[in-house]
Image (cartoon, rainbow, N blue to C red):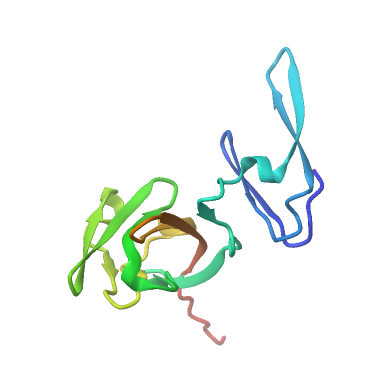
Amino acid sequence: MSKGQGTNVFTSGPILILNWKPGDHDLNYTCTARNPVSNSSRTVLAKEFCAGSTASRENNAPVVVTGILGESAILPADIPDKNKIDNINWASRTPVAVVTPEGTSVNIITTHLNYKGRLNVSSKTYDLQINHLKMEDAGFYRADINLKTSSTSTTITKNYTLQIYSKTMIVDS
């Protein structure tokens, strides 16, 4: 598969994830499905897989966040106009949480038991803080930030890669 500089390709079972940079949308990709008796290929443009005009694709490159096992990591929402937030859907391999503004605070509905009691969201920045990090928390995360105005609604998608390291002791011999 040919890809542009900076384009990341990931697979998760039957799912192919392309994180590409501006200018790579005209690249061709060949997808091949194989089974024991046959295979089938199809060439497609990367832009065929992307969301329509109502979704923002301005910054689709993942933000790399590093955390230490047992400590906390913060996934920055970096929302331009916090007054227009309808909700934020945080997801990893499965849905993680839904965040909605409630006056001067936020309501967090944790949608995966693995994160129960370990999530905080700042009411000023809407950043997601994951506490008591586990190794299984490492991986790709996505924030679908749903904004509303009187006449339109827009979804901004932000991607993250959470890397988790354990502390090691160096012993001089």
Q: Decide which of 156, 132 is in the foreground and name it.
A: 156
Asked if residue 66 lies left or right of residue 36, the reply is: left
- Left or right for 35, reference 74: right
Residue situated furthest top in the rendering: 37
Front residue of 155/60: it is 155
Q: Is residue 40 above or below residue 115?
A: above
Residue 82 shows in the view: yes
Q: Which of these two is toward me, 33 or 69?
A: 33
In-image side of 7 versus 165 (left or right): right
Question: Vertical placement of 168 versus 163: above or below?
Answer: below
Q: Identify the residue at image location x=42%, y=71%.
A: 79
What is the tally of numbered marks visible in this picture? 0
Residue drawn at x 31%, y 55% is: 97
Q: Residue at x 56, y 50 (%)?
A: 53
Q: Quadrant of residue 15?
A: top right
Query: Residue 8 at what x, y percent from top left?
Result: 68, 55
**Position of residue 111 measured from the top left corner of the image (x, y, whole percent):** 27, 49
Looking at this view, name the residue that lies furthest to the right: 2
**Res 72 seen here:** no
Using the image, determine if residue 28 lies above or below residue 153: above
Q: Quadrant of the N terminus?
A: top right
In the image, farthest residue toward the bottom:
172
Residue at position x 56%, y 36% in the image = 13
> Where does the image place residue 170, in percent across and percent down from the top left?
53, 82
Residue 92, placed above or below residue 124 = above
Q: Quadrant of the C terminus?
A: bottom right
